[in-house]
Amino acid sequence: MEGQLLTVIIVVATALIFDFTNGFHDTANVVATSISTRAMAPRIAVGYASILNFVGAFISLQVAATVASDVVDPNSITLLVVFGGLVGAIAWNLITWYFGLPSSSSHALIGGIVGAMLVAKGPGAVFFEEGILGKVMIPALVAPMLAFIIGGIAILLLYRIVGRLRPGPVTQGFRGGQVISGGLLALAHGTNDAQKTMGVIALALVAYGSLPAADPTPPTWVVVSAATAIAAGTYVGGWRIIKTMGSRIHKMDSAQGFAAQGAGAAVILASSHGGFPLSTTHTISGAVIGSGAAKRLSAVRWGVAGNIVAAWIVTLPASAAIGALTYGVTRLFGTGALGPVIVSGLILGGAAMLFTRRAREGPPVAAATSEA
Amino acid sequence: MIASIVDTDALLTVVWASLAAGVGVTAAFGFAILGGLRAIELGRTGRVGEAAIFAVIGMLGVAATFAAIVFGIVVLTE
């Protein structure tokens, strides 16, 4: 039991590190629009997003329930499966970050768990149709398209409503509105993304025996720790973003920013209520592209749209393969804590090596961002 | 085939709720800006009656925006 306790501590810590990196990665998506339209000063935008990420994690538990119950069979889960899944997701995120390839942290997390479960218990323990396809893949495809359409309709409507007014006061008005829409977007991000980690920790607690498989609702300490990790990641990630913001962010007017943030927040919040764990970055990107396309078709960054499709196709199988491999390697050392300790050390070493090399070499040539 | 795999009701709810919230809130806030700015402009030129109408449109826009947000968050937390 002591070995199991050490293993569950390692798994929960790994899940929270994943949650932190998720917030770290996604700060740009949540605050970029508000900063680029000058609706908010960068420091205020980052702090504001961080607080609302934290609050958002408490709004709903539907997504956590989906991750804990509907993707893999909670009755067959083991701590090593959860660990393998988490390492698969983290490793895939590191690889895609290093090579500048598009990715999705959310899909990587689910792919990793599925891959580890396939090796551990076989296909019978994975809910392929109603779980993976019905609750993850199809909603993940629908959400960015929906955000694209809503962002487009919203901006066309806004231009029709305020089009004859003087631009200066209108810009000021929408900058004020972006305080609301940016806050809602941060709230939505915290709601959907923090819950994925809560769901994974709930699976670990089911495997440990401290939560029933029939009702794996995350306890309060899991909700608080996941909320804290994603909020801290958002805050820390913000300082990196502030430094690079000026050159990277696509310029848009404040009405477009308001429409894009509103569309993204609406789709993510509605999906969270439906229990769909989707890629928040893909959804926000869809809304931004939609609000740009409605104004001028050539403004669409088709490369970003292509990245979303590529990430949608590649991430799940790739992270599943790494999750499966990780589970296999960990299992070589038995079912105790030795395997997770060794694999954690390897991952930390690998991450340090990649960070050092990337710092020495500079950003990758294919400067696509890794997306969550 | 797809309909049997996907929870169609939940997905359709996401579609209509997102459309209503995303388009509705942005339009309501657009009317808030239209009403507010036009009320100020008309008030300056002495057209008090028209200014009052636009002021009401603006206030309704603000009220609709906040009401929709509060309603959405209440629904989410239930």
Image (cartoon, coloured by chain):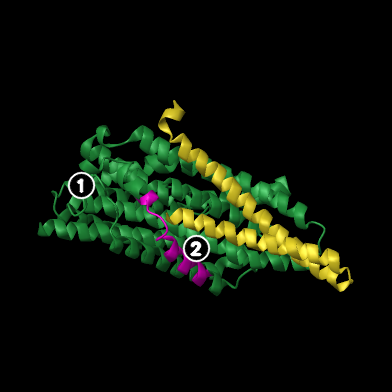
Percent position (x, y) of residue A163? 79, 56
Q: What residue do we see at 42% from left, 54% from top?
A: B78
Q: Quadrant of residue B1?
A: top left
Q: Badge 2 sits on which subunit? A: A
Q: Position of residue A338 (x, y in %)?
A: 15, 56
Q: Position of residue A128 (x, y in %)?
A: 35, 34
Viewer-closest of A264 and A272? A272
> Which amino acid, mark 2?
Thr
Q: Which mark is residue A27?
A: 2
A248 or A8: which is nearer to us? A8
A223 sits to left or right of A155: left
Secondary structure at badge 2 equals helix
Name the quarter where the N terminus of chain A is drawn.
Answer: bottom left
The residue under label 1 is: A78
Mark 1, Cα crowd under 10 Å, few <14 / some 14-19 / many 20+, is: many
Chain A drawn in what color? green
Of mark 2 and mark 1, the one earlier in the sequence is 2
Q: Chain of mark 1?
A: A
Indicate the secondary structure of the residue bearing disc 1: loop
- Residue shown at 42% from the left, 36% from the top: A134
Dot label at residue A292: none
Question: Marks 2 and 1, how far apart in space?
Answer: 32 Å
Q: Which residues are magenta?
A: A46-64
**Label 2 packing within 10 angstroms: few (<14), some (14-19), many (20+):** many
| A45 over A147 or under it: above or below | below
Chain letter corresponding to the colour yellow = B
